[in-house]
Image (tube, rainbow, N blue to C red):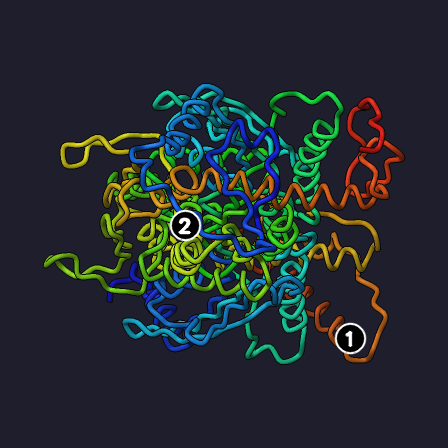
Amino acid sequence: MSKGLPETRTDAAMSELVPEPRPKPAVPMKPVSINPNLLGYIGIDTIIEQMRKKTMKTGFDFNIMVVGQSGLGKSTLVNTLFKSQVSRKASSWNREEKIPKTVEIKAIGHVIEEGGVKMKLTVIDTPGFGDQINNENCWEPIEKYINEQYEKFLKEEVNIARKKRIPDTRVHCCLYFISPTGHSLRPLDLEFMKHLSKVVNIIPVIAKADTMTLEEKSEFKQRVRKELEVNGIEFYPQKEFDEDLEDKTENDKIRQESMPFAVVGSDKEYQVNGKRVLGRKTPWGIIEVENLNHCEFALLRDFVIRTHLQDLKEVTHNIHYETYRAKRLNDNGGLPPGEGLLGTVLPPGPATPCPTAE
Amino acid sequence: MDKEYVGFAALPNQLHRKSVKKGFDFTLMVAGESGLGKSTLINSLFLTNLYEDRQVPEARARLTQTLTIERRGVEIEEGGIKVKLTLVDTPGFGDSVDCSDCWLPVVRFIEEQFEQYLRDESGLNRKNIQDSRVHCCLYFISPFGRGLRPLDVAFLRAVHEKANIIPVIGKADALMPKETQALKQKIREQLQEEDINIYQFPDCDSDEDEDFKRQDAEMKESIPFAVVGSCEVVRDGGTRPVRGRRYSWGTVEVENPHHCDFLNLRRMLVQTHLQDLKEVTHDLLYEGYRARCLQSLARPGARDRASRSKLSRQSATDIPLPMLPLADAEKLIREKDEELRRMQEMLEKMQAQMQQSQAQGEQSDAL
């Protein structure tokens, strides 16, 4: 399935050069010969630099959701990932802290800057997930939230007078925290991922991995991968969206060997071999968060931020969002939403001026 | 012959010899969600491999699994003493998406053992009563949470008056020392808030030496015990072999008191309080069950919970004779029970008389 779709205006503002779709040409193209008299350098390749400058000026949005039982280190991990206090830890022992009775959705935004590039990061926390005695359907508020963001975007897109840059609150990435039991996935994990892998990019993560030895880790990961496969759960990067062979080999390696990443998070620094490192100090040793021999945090960070950040956004926009949009339009009889809302998925959003059929 | 030496100081030895010959029964229940290291800990505690053939079902199978109760028995011998240890396991607890009432099978199991014992005790042939009552319940709390979860609280409240609960934090090597302390503190607070009565280790006698008292106090302070289990022996770079878990950043030693409370748990559970656990089960928990049971038979609907302070049986005169729908065997049981009570009363009277005559005797001596 070709991922490239006609660029929307929002894409242009925020993304690097997206390759145009390569449809099979109706007529084979004649090879164009370059006039050998035209020597020298044209300068087309500076487009990359121009895009980069634009990105730096406008900055970009990234929305990451964390899901998992309380106490699995979600907030700490996000803070470690982005090297700043972007997620408020609810783990202060002194405060009276009640587990919410239903799953709450808390979105907190921060602007982080690095190397001249500004990122508006939104961390969406889901306290209460999986903490009750009866956790049936506790994923529903989460699914609802995700669809609401698609709906918001859709409404903006469908407006006659559109904003130059539609604010993107869609969830680009959902980190799902698996408890390091060492046995297998829990039924709740399966249920959540089954329901949500179709609407959002899920990256499963093994939390608090410092309780497993190397053998236990690798066995557990194998078992989890197998269980996900057997249950037809496609986590990000999804096989069907690999664009070319290069992507496929790279992603295959990640899918079959590295994921789910077994991570440890920390916001405390310790002195190890003369360096200050983030870690956890125990009587039997110091666990270094960024040491690949200790845990796979660095792999997760590189994966999410340094190599696949843009791809996460693209898959969200081009696949998940489009799926949602198609469904909404179909439900509405091909009409844009706002006219005779029949959407079975969501409650109606705020009233928008009813656009006529486009 | 020394007229002041009667010789019953040798009684403890006689008891000891008898119990050594008889052997020792103990039933330990282990509960808590899966993946907290319960089986490994049991194997570590008793140096056995009780869970060798265990199959952990995968998540899809557990979607519809109900809680089962499994019993495993093992005979351990040490220093000439035989212990018949029965382990009660609760696989499936806390696994499902909907865990409502998942503790009920456990409660029912414990009460069934009480009921069985009550029947045996009231029966005709009481020579070989098998004591299958649960003497202790090790409840495993997750180190990944922030204290007791709602499910933990529900389980503990359902079970605390029926079995001796010793709370334990499993896989404690997930925590740094400060985190362990904070978690223990939080759990203790929650236990108090929720009015959950865990097993109280008895105070040591006042005539013990200071060292022992201090040790005892330290051990009590470390409840809930933060434990790590392992059955693997690790040779850590040339030093002596230890039982532990080897990580890339170091090795956790199971028997190192600075690493975890395994030694404390083993000492308190196995080495010093095994007998007390049995006694509390019999004198308090079982009696409570028995009183409730008999009273509810006598006055259906009226429940009177034996309070913690009342260690003695309610005297026979307080409980009106229970009326039972009868099979003949039941009738016989009731009659025997009555006889028992009458005999008990007689015994008490005799004891009272003896004491009186002793007192009189002393008086006359003094005079």
Residue occupying the point 41% across, 27% down? A52
Examine the rendered structure and indicate whether residue A104 appears above or below residue B278: above
Residue B359 visible in this rendered orientation of the protein:
no
- Residue furthest to the front in view is A37
Return the residue nearer the eye: A306 or A259. Answer: A306
Return the residue nearer the eye: B359 or A47. Answer: A47
Q: Amino acid at mark 2?
A: Phe
Quadrant in which the C terminus of chain A appears: top right
- Between the residue at mark 1 and the residue at mark 2, the CA separation in whole angstroms equals 63 Å
Residue B247: image x %, image y %? 27, 53
Examine the rendered structure and indicate whether residue A36 appears above or below residue B171: above
Residue B330 badge: 1
Q: For mark 1, give the secondary structure.
A: helix
| Image quarter of residue A356 | top right
Q: Chain of mark 2?
A: A
- Residue furthest to the left in view is B238
Residue B224: image x %, image y %? 43, 44
Residue A215: image x %, image y %? 33, 62
* Left or right of A313 on screen, residue B333: right
Return the residue nearer the eye: A208 or A110. Answer: A110
Same chain letter for marks 1 and 2? no
Residue B149 badge: none
Q: Amino acid at mark 1?
A: Glu
Residue B295 visible in this rendered orientation of the protein:
yes
Return the residue nearer the eye: A224 or A252. Answer: A252
Q: Please name the residue that numbered disc 2 is placed on.
A: A261
Do the residues bearing badges 1 and 2 touch, measured as CB atoms within 8 Å? Answer: no
Residue occupying the point 30% across, 59% down? B4
Q: For mark 2, give the secondary structure.
A: strand
Report the mark closest to the observer, 1 or 2: 2
